[in-house]
Amino acid sequence: MNQIDQTDIVTESPEATLIRQNVEESAYYQKDPERFSQFLTPEALLVNVKGVRVMGRGEIVKFMKKATQSFLANVWVKNEVIQITFLRHDVAVVSGIQHVFVKGEHLSEEVAKGSLTLVLVKEEGTWLTAAGQNTLIEP
């Protein structure tokens, strides 16, 4: 089995730069489901670290709104892009690490990591996530 070394450097191209920005910025909006949904295709499919599969932009927004009302309100993530593979000029697979942080009394600490895989498609000049899965790798 060929694992991606975290030291791999993504060859930067204008498209790779746009994809990297999209993946990193989308993590910032995980507490704002409406804004986060703008990074998704209408038929997007996401599978979270618990294996919960949510399909469709509207259902993802509903799911995320519930999550922001739970203990997850104190959790946020940072996406780190490790590798971008272009399957076609308008389809890319992103491999990365999702860093999970929890805010305590005074500090924020990383509590987990996930192996993040995303499929992005370019629609009308914008890269959007069509599918994604995050698998817990470090609790």
Image (cartoon, grey):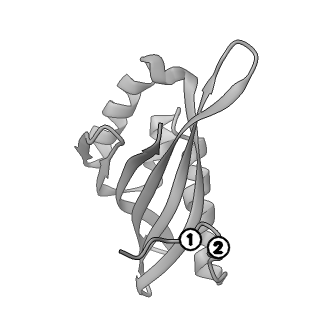
Name the one closer to the observer, 99 or 57. 99
Quarter of the N terminus within the rendering: bottom left
Q: Amino acid at mark 2?
A: Thr
Name the one closer to the observer, 72 or 97. 97
> Residue extending furthest front?
1
Q: Which mark is residue 17?
A: 2
Estimate the spatial distance between the alpha carbons at disc 1 and disc 2, rounded to whole Å. Answer: 20 Å
Left or right, residue 71 beside residue 41: right
State the image quarter where residue 18 is shown. bottom right
State the image quarter where residue 76 is shown. top right
Determine whether the residue tagged by mark 2 lies in a helix, strand or loop. Answer: helix
> Residue extending furthest right?
106
Q: Which residue is mark 1?
A: 5
Q: Is residue 83 above or below residue 118?
A: below
| Residue 15 x, y percent position in the rendering | 58, 79
Residue under the point 45% across and 54% down:
115
Q: Amino acid at mark 1?
A: Asp
Left or right, residue 31 beside residue 128: right
* Other-residue count near label 2 (Cα within 10 Å), few / some / many at <14 / 14–19 / ≥20: few
Q: Is residue 39 above or below residue 104?
A: below
* Other-residue count near label 1 (Cα within 10 Å), few / some / many at <14 / 14–19 / ≥20: few
Q: Is residue 123 visible?
A: no
Left or right, residue 109 beside residue 5: right
Q: Is residue 118 visible?
A: yes
Q: Earlier in the sequence, mark 1 or mark 2?
A: 1
Determine whether the residue tagged by mark 1 lies in a helix, strand or loop. Answer: loop
Left or right, residue 136 beside residue 125: left
| Residue 137 x, y percent position in the rendering | 44, 48
Q: Is residue 22 above or below residue 124?
A: above
